[in-house]
Amino acid sequence: MATKTFAGKIIEINEEGYLVNASEWTPDVAKEIAAEEGIELTDLHFRVLDFIRDKAGSGVALTIRSIGNSGIIDIKQFYQLFPGGPLKKASRIAGIKKPSSCV
Amino acid sequence: MKKILILGGGTAGTIMVNKLRKALEREEWEITIVDQHRTHYYQPGFLFIPFDIYTRHDVVKPKGDFFPAGVNVVYAAIDRIEADRNRVHLEGGTFLQYDFLIIATGTQTRPDQTPGLKDALWYKEIFDFYTIEGAVALRDFFRKWEGGRLVMNIADLPYKCPVAPLEFIFLADAYFTKKGMRDKVDITYVTPLPGAFTKPVATRMLSELLQEKNIHIVPEFYLERIDNENKKLISYDEQEVPFDVLAIVPLNMGSDMIARSGLGDDLNYVLTDKHTLRSEKYENIFVLGDAANLPTSKAGSVAHFSAEILFENLMSAIEGRPLLAKFDGHANCYIETGFGKGSLIDFNYETEPLPGTFPLPGVGPFGLLKNTKMNHYGKVLFRWIYWHILLKGKELPVEAEMTMAGKKLWKF
């Protein structure tokens, strides 16, 4: 596994750049990953990231629709906050695994 | 008398009721199956109707023909499950009591959930082929169509039979070629996935086929609404795809009854342990087939393989033993590719579809991720197997658990 320095910490990442251990995530780590994706995080972004981290911790599959049902933002806003592949980008910034779509 | 109640008499429920009636003493166990519809559809056959390969007659039989003697059959709509009291309420105010409950209420297409879908163009220039009505309406449309832009779109994930939309465009390519008008038909595949399929090896094989057949692909397109006036698909990030005729897989959802019972996720799929197939909330509720929120395909093959695991675990639960059988997510799908050929994929939770032979290692007769005539015959024969063997819960020469024998590990 590769490692990378985010916010002064050496963090293990997989070949697609997702954190290996969600527990190594901090808001500062999130800001630096977001910068790589060309996104500057606002409070609204962080509320979505918290929702995603909670949901991932509960073991329930994360979907774009479930974020639309979160009560925080609708799907259209989700696309605006994380343009181009919002679920993948938001998951990476939230420090969780890449969401797997089942076949 | 102890009671087992099965909700849903589709593929999953029918397989289960047959297995259970055979295994359990009639004096000891009363088995009841509930479904609101009396017709059993051979759903894999819907795909062939738009192309005049199957007729309605090929895919329809009475449900009652497949239920064994010695079970109660109740044709009624279900209001909700009251799991704390081991009861299922039916519409009209009656209820059924159970000791063990098996939920097999499947998944349904919900065109009402996408703005502009069930609107002016519905069944005029927009069709689904996951219902008999949609498949027949599309056949009538294609018979008279003179060509233009044919778009196949998947509205959202997950959806039933993940390879069906690909098969649809392969069969469309063959159909319009045979009609001598392929040059007048532009075929585009619009999907929320990053490619033709989710897993890399199968995606590569399928992308090559798409290219070979001159079919365009628009990936990462997440449908927001349909503009009926300008005949366009519009995504959440404002991409647009124009169409003259649209074949669509509408959003799939589990039964609203699951939501009313408080047992489901955002899409009304029952929260289910992916290995034991037991409800995450109640020890005497099991879930079979598309109704469960398992991270594998929603497909008849999954219902079939997981039925064996559920059966073993239910027997253990009845006897108060731990649930030792573990479902591995095994799925197996024939992929019709047109012109009398087909491909085949076999996979589970952990292993993506790989090339090789099936079911006998090195022998076949079916080729995994290969485009062969034999695979097509497999699919054709399967309809007979479905009606005569599978639904009756009889043994097939294929193991419930996926095997690596006969598969080749692929390195890029």
Image: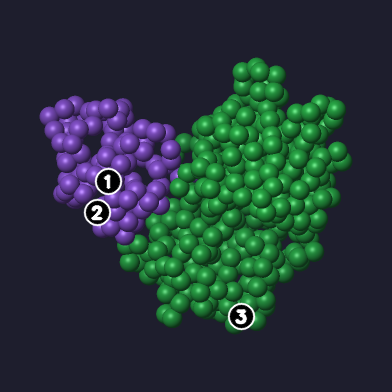
The residue most toward the left is: A8
The residue pinned by badge 3 equals: B145
Q: In the rendering, at what x and y percent does residue B10 appear?
A: 70, 48
Q: Going by the image, does B129 lie left or right of B191?
A: right
The amino acid type of the residue labelled 2 equals Leu
Q: Residue at x 69, y 23 (%)?
A: B318
Q: In the rendering, at what x and y percent does residue B259 appear?
A: 52, 47
Callout 3: chain = B
- Mark 2 in CB contact with mark 1 (< 8 angstroms): yes
Q: Which mark is residue A48?
A: 1
Q: Could you say which chain is coloured purple in the image?
A: A
Q: Could you say which chain is coloured green in the image?
A: B
Residue B390's place in the image compared with B59, above or below, is above
Q: Quadrant of residue B69?
A: top right
The amino acid type of the residue labelled 3 equals Trp
Q: Nearer the viewer, residue B188 or B67?
A: B67
Q: Quadrant of residue B225?
A: bottom left
Callout 1: chain = A
**Mark 1 residue crowding within 10 angstroms, few (<14) / some (14–19) / many (20+):** many
Residue B179's place in the image compared with B256, above or below, is below
**Mark 2 residue crowding within 10 angstroms, few (<14) / some (14–19) / many (20+):** some
Callout 2: chain = A
The residue pinned by badge 2 equals: A81
* Label 2: element kind: helix
